[in-house]
Amino acid sequence: MTVNELGVFIDGENVNQFEIISEIFKILDSRNFHSKTRKIIFSNLNNVDISLLTEALKTNLLQIVVSYKRIVKNKKKDKAREQNKNNADFRFYIEVLDCLYQDNPDGFVFATGDKDYTELVLELKKRGKYLIGFGNENRASDKYI
């Protein structure tokens, strides 16, 4: 299988060490992979070193995607509260599917540290897509690995 173009997606909630991001692109470049799409996804930027993030964005030509909090109203207490759980994961799925249908790359690169994307990986493999995963092997499911 010839792999010319990849969509690269980084889960900013789980891959927050910006030095690792540069290493990912060095590995891809050394293997002559061309990345058509490069995105890093966050649910918020509260705990992010903005200067390191800005440097990672510029150095690696990344597009940042922030999935903002949803406001949920509690009917019993008549109070609104912010709900942030899994926002970045949902946005990750949406961005990957957008890339799949709009750009149709030969494969995908996922940089993440959790198991939330196992079903997405299996679906992309079923569709004949080449996949490269970067992350913590101890936290990933066997299917993901």
Image (tube, rainbow, N blue to C red):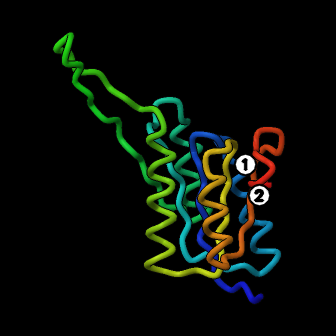
Tell whether 68 sits left or right of 129. Answer: left
**Percent of width and height locating residue 135:** 75, 48
- Give the labeled residue for mark 1: 19
- Farthest bottom residue? 2
**Percent of width and height locating residue 4:** 68, 86
Helix, strand or loop status at disc 1: helix
The mark found on residue 23 in the picture is: 2
The amino acid type, in three-letter code, at marker 2 is: Glu
- Farthest top residue? 77
Q: Quadrant of the N terminus?
A: bottom right
Considering depth in this image, is 22 or 69 the residue closer to the camera?
69
Q: Relative to residue 103, is residue 81 depicted above or below?
A: above
Residue drawn at the location 77% of the way across and 58% of the way down: 23
> Mark 2–mark 1 contact, CB under 8 Å?
yes
For the residues labelled 2 and 1, the Cα–Cα distance comes to 7 Å
Helix, strand or loop status at disc 2: helix
Residue drawn at the location 65% of the way across and 61% of the way down: 121
Tell whether 106 sits left or right of 57. Answer: right
The amino acid type, in three-letter code, at marker 1 is: Glu
**Percent of width and height locating residue 114:** 67, 42
Considering depth in this image, is 52 or 12 the residue closer to the camera?
12
User: In terms of image quadrants, where is residue 16?
Assistant: top right
Residue drawn at the location 48% of the way across and 44% of the way down: 88
Tell whether 96 sits left or right of 128. Answer: left
